[in-house]
Amino acid sequence: MRRLVLLILALATLLPSLAQAYDVLILQSRRDAAYDEVLKGFHFEKKSSLRLLVLSDYAEVDVVRIVREDRPKLILAVGDAALAAARKIQQTPVVAVMALGVHKRSSQANVAGIGMFASPERYVSLFRSMKARRVGIVYNPAKSGWYMRQALQAAAVGGIELVTREVSSARDTLGQLATLAGKVDALWMLPDSTAVTRETTEAYFRFGQQHSVPVISFASSYLGLGAAAVLDIDRVAMGRQADAMVAELLRGSRADGAPLEFPRGITVKTNPTVLKHLGSSISE
Amino acid sequence: MAMNSFPHTRWSYFRTSFQFKLFLIFTLLTFLVTGLLSTLYIASEIRKTHRHAAEQLQMRAQQLADSIRLPLYAENSDMLCHMAEQAAAAREIRAVVVSAPGGRVLANIHSPNPDDTSDVIGTTVDVRSLVGDSVESAMAGGRDSSSVLLGTVRMEQGTADQSKAIRQVVVLSISMAIIFWMSVSLFCYLVLRQLTRSFNALVKGINAMQGGDFTARIDIQSNDEAGRAARAVNDLAQALQQRSEENISLQEDRLKIERQMLQAQKLESLGVMAGGIAHDFNNLLQSILGNVELALMQLPPESKSKKYIDNAISSARNAAHLTNLMLTYVGKGFITKKELNLNELVKVNAEMLRTAASSSVTFELCLSPELPVIMADEAHIQQVVMNLTINAAESIEKQPGVIRLSTGVQNCDQEMLAQSLVDDKPAPGRYVFLEVRDNGCGMDDDTLKRLFDPFFTTKFTGRGLGMSAVMGIMRTHSGALCVESEPGKGTTFRVLFPISESARPAELQETGRPPQSDTCSVLKGPLSGVVLVVDDERSVLNVCSKMVTLCGFTAITACDGVDAVEKFREKSDEIVAVLMDLTMPNMDGITAMNEIFAIRPDARVILSSGFNEEELSERITGQVPAGFIRKPYSMKVLETELRRVVNGEE
């Protein structure tokens, strides 16, 4: 009896797979407009050899079995949940987008993608245009240490002094922010999930308001809370960037394996009111 | 009996009035509505106050929650306590408790007020993180708007302020309600009073009419139902008033007719009585006067008794005059109407009265020069002038005074003649008037009412027949008589006579017959023949037959009409004249005269009577007698009449 059930299940899963052979398996964390923008840049509609699997549509998805059965040539993980599921795959190359955890690639060589961090040079360039020499940063070394190393290098090149404060928990953020009072000309919010939480977000902007320093953040949603400027990621451009990366990987032209890139479509957005209140400006 | 059910006191009248009932209804209704609205308003205000306090407390707690978000997340108790103390410093805040999500109290501030025993309201507010994105959601587009619970804030507040505010609202609302209620009630009262004023006027007017005052009119203040009812009642009152006036007029007319009938009956009775008395008196006087004259003729001129005989004759003639006055009052006196000039009569009598009256009395004559003549008995008019003038002179007495006699012509209408005191009102037209005005003592109303009653006098020596004779004369002359008098100021008599149809301008005319002398005059020629003397009174018969004999005739006598007719038939050829009394038993004088005329149509009959000639002429329907003499007559009058009848001498 058990054998009969297993046979039926195997036929039910294998037969469609055989009928729908494809190159790219797109794992999407949830249905989200931001992800749709990425897929739009990925030219999702024009591609015929791919399969889209939205994880939030299912209670539990066995990605490993699907990959084993479908044998896609590449997996595009959209979002952290999709990346986490894709990390279970060891043989198939994975390109991650819209995932903060994409930088944890030390243990997995098949994971590549486009990060959520704008390049430090863009931030340094922004600080220079704002004439900010001392820039405060609160970060968790475990999560953002790799980025801070690049940021320090870029700051040194750009002549910016980074005043860093390390935290290991969100509650430490408030205290560390307080230590920056009078020591910085601007505050740099990193997309660090330890240093920036819902509980501590307010502290950044209150600090900026109390000490009249502009807060430079990473997402346009913070402009409404008091950020003076943000380096926002263009998701459609990110999709195109991922499309190009996927194409190179499928052609096998990248000899160094899966790359990890900074997003190229970055837009500077400002809150003119905040800048006016702070008496600051951004020169071209 | 229905009147007993009506309210008598002012309060009970007001209590049962339509105005009071409406006012009571409006007032109670207004009170209920005002009370209901006030209660609803107060309840609403209480709820609003509670809600406002709760919202205020909620807002304060929320404000604190917003401000302690970061210290609470950092669990900074010192800062939380400091901020809680600041929040608790607000009025009426009793307690502020800040707790971590697990219920662990991080700050607990209490500020008890031992004097405040009011209730406490409280609220608990969650302290949540700022609505913002996590890093993941912010990177994904910032669509996540959930927040994180950081802890709670509980805040408690006393309700003393609420109670005070509610008390103020209650007091203010009740005061306003009372003022509103009283204002509306006052307004209702004024409006209802205005509305019911018409009804009150209507009731007042009806009550006045019920009391018999039909002249009262209801003041119509509006054209509504009450006004129309008032107008209808006014019309009814006018009709009733008109009917009442007609009834009064009819009643007055009836009384007037009754008075006139009574007066006529009185006059008739008086006439019958006076006529009877005058007849008997005149017979007696005829006997007395005739016998005395016969006795005087027997006396020598030098006889001392002659003076006494003359006195007796004078008294007998006064008695005859008095009898004539009585007859005059009842309209049966001797009158002989002729055209008469009133001015001449007044002049003659005024001269005579001026000499007789007191020297303090001044006579003024104001006689109209062109005065028409009147048809009147000269003696009677003279009596009128004399009586009125004497009356005026006596009213002046010994004080200086003026008597003014005026004559003239006056056009009299019915209204003017209605003021005449003579019962029979003459027809409107032109009248000759004589006015006698004095400024004497005047007369009061009682005197005026009885002025013309026979035998009424205010003088000690008067007989009380003067003014009644004036009234009788005016009655027999179809004239009018008006009197105006005021005590202390004088009296004015005005007598009016109808103008004679000939209406010749007044000229001096000789009055009628020449004055007869009572003394014997020289006889013009011898008289002879047989005269039949007829009278039922034996004494009169004797003296008359003696007087006829002395005149030269042969007298035969008869004691009544039947006897006279019989004797005339026996000696009709010899009898030259018949002297016959008018009133006799068995057969009266007129019947006997007619019998005599049947025997001998050219028989000469002289009737004698105590009545006047006009009355006699009314009773004679056939052949008229040859002459008439009024008892008592003198020897001279008898001889003159016999001469005229027998010999045709004037």
Image (cartoon, helix red, strand yellow):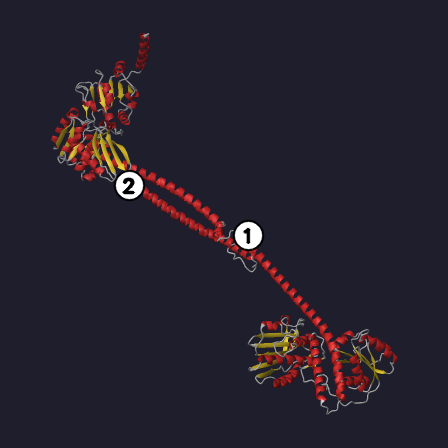
The residue positioned 36% from the left and 39% from the top of the image is B43
Question: Can residue B458 be seen?
Answer: yes
B61 lies left or right of B407:
left
User: Which dot marks residue B161?
Assistant: 2
Secondary structure category for the residue under label 1? helix
Question: How far across and how far down the image is residue A267, in percent?
Answer: 22, 31
Q: Chain of mark 2?
A: B
B191 lies left or right of B405:
left
Of circles 1 and 2, which is in front? 1
Q: Which residue is mark 1?
A: B3
Q: Where is B453 relative to B3, above or below?
A: below
Question: How far across and how far down the image is residue B550, in percent?
Answer: 80, 87
Quadrant that contains the C terminus of chain B: bottom right
Q: Is the Cβ of the residue at disc 1 closer than 8 Å to that at disc 2?
A: no
Secondary structure category for the residue under label 2? helix
Q: Nearer the viewer, residue B495 or A105?
A: B495
A65 lies left or right of B35:
left
Q: Quadrant of residue A65?
A: top left
Question: How far across and how far down the image is residue B79, in percent?
Answer: 18, 34
Q: Quadrant of residue A119?
A: top left
Kindly identify the amino acid type of the residue bearing the numbered disc 1: Met
For mark 1, does the 10 Å Cα neighbourhood hold few (<14), some (14 to 19), or many (20 or more) residues?
A: few
For mark 2, does the 10 Å Cα neighbourhood hold few (<14), some (14 to 19), or many (20 or more) residues?
A: some
Q: Nearer the viewer, residue B594 or B298?
A: B298
